[in-house]
Image: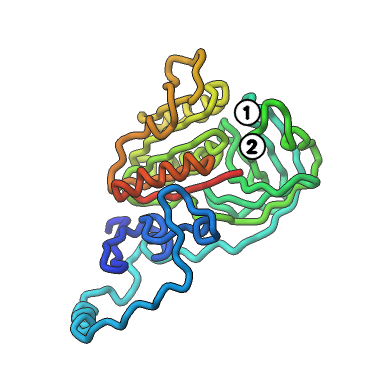
Amino acid sequence: MGARCSLVVNGRSVRVSTGDTPLEAALAEGMIAPVQAQAGNPLAGQGVAHQGAARPARRPPAHRARLESLRPSLPTTPIQGQEAAPPIPVAIRKGTVTEIRRLSPGIVEVVATLTKRPTLEPGHEARVTFAGLPTLTLAPTLRVDGAAEINEAVFHIPRDPEGGPVDTIRLDQPVRLKGPVGRGQYRPGGGRLVLVAAGAGFGAIWAIARAARYVEPAREMALAVGARDALDLYMRESLDWLRRTGVARIVLCADRGGPRPPDVRSGPLTAHLPSLRATDVVHVAGDVSTVGAVQVLAASVGARCYPIMLD
């Protein structure tokens, strides 16, 4: 039995992967605007639904009769492996900061030890509050070597090299997590897995990539990682692990000029993506502009795209 089935929405065929609900499938195909756009913050390539639109006219009897004639051919019970996964309930976890490490000039790794195990899936985000600081939307991940205890939350957080609020995070500082937020989590099954990470967005992508190598070791994977400065490509140890597990298509790039290692390409991340296919499943994490651009590229070929936008 395959890991995909099809759904027809408004006359258009939509691919559905394991664990997806019809709403998630329509979002991934770009048929409806994501939550951010519906709230008044449209993404690149996404339009905001007009409020108060007229309700569609009733179907003529002939159309209704045709639908009734097709009904017996539809399955009356869920297909095995295609049942809609129930959403994970929002939970609150509390803890304290136990480790702080500077990964690069623009990225800091913060580890919080929690009183209870977090229930988030790889790629899920959470609203994270370090006591005394503004709440951030972050995606829990793993350390760059893949390590993490079950009651830990590891974060890769962007920082201003000139200094800012992130530099005030201290050991033993209280932390509060509320989540999951977003629907960009890893879903097994489907076509090639294309993972795109900009800056600290690699944290979310690293969690997805590592889970996928354990759950689906034979699944094709392509990874593109970018940063404004080559010095912020802090994830070499993570990429080495992925290569050892069989991931051959890994591309690094940096926006800014100046000296860079020979394996780091020049230019924006979107210029170095693999040629997307309609059967691809794309996860992209990072700033709004990069995420929006990748969504547009995925939509142009009909690929499914799950965005993870981080503060």
Residue 160, quarter of the rendered image = top right
Q: Which mark is residue 106?
A: 1
Task: Determine whether, in the image, residue 293 is placed left or right of residue 118.
Answer: left
Outermost residue toward the top in this view = 259
- Residue 89 vertical position relative to residue 53 in the rendered view, above or below: above
Q: Quadrant of the C terminus?
A: top right
- Pointer 2 local density, CA inside 10 Å: few below 14, some 14–19, many at least 20: many
Mark 1 is surrounded, within 10 Å at the Cα level, by few (under 14), some (14 to 19) or many (20 or more) other residues, namely: many
Query: Does the image show residue 234?
Result: yes
| Residue 266 shown left or right of residue 59 in the figure | right
Q: Amino acid at mark 2?
A: Ile
Residue 157 numbered tag = 2
Along the viewing direction, whichever of 85 and 205 lies nearer the viewer: 205
Identify the residue at horizontal 38%, vertical 56% (top origin).
Answer: 30
Q: Secondary structure at mark 2?
A: strand
Observer-nearest residue: 172 or 215? 172
Which of the marked residues, 1 or 2, is nearer the chain's N terminus? 1
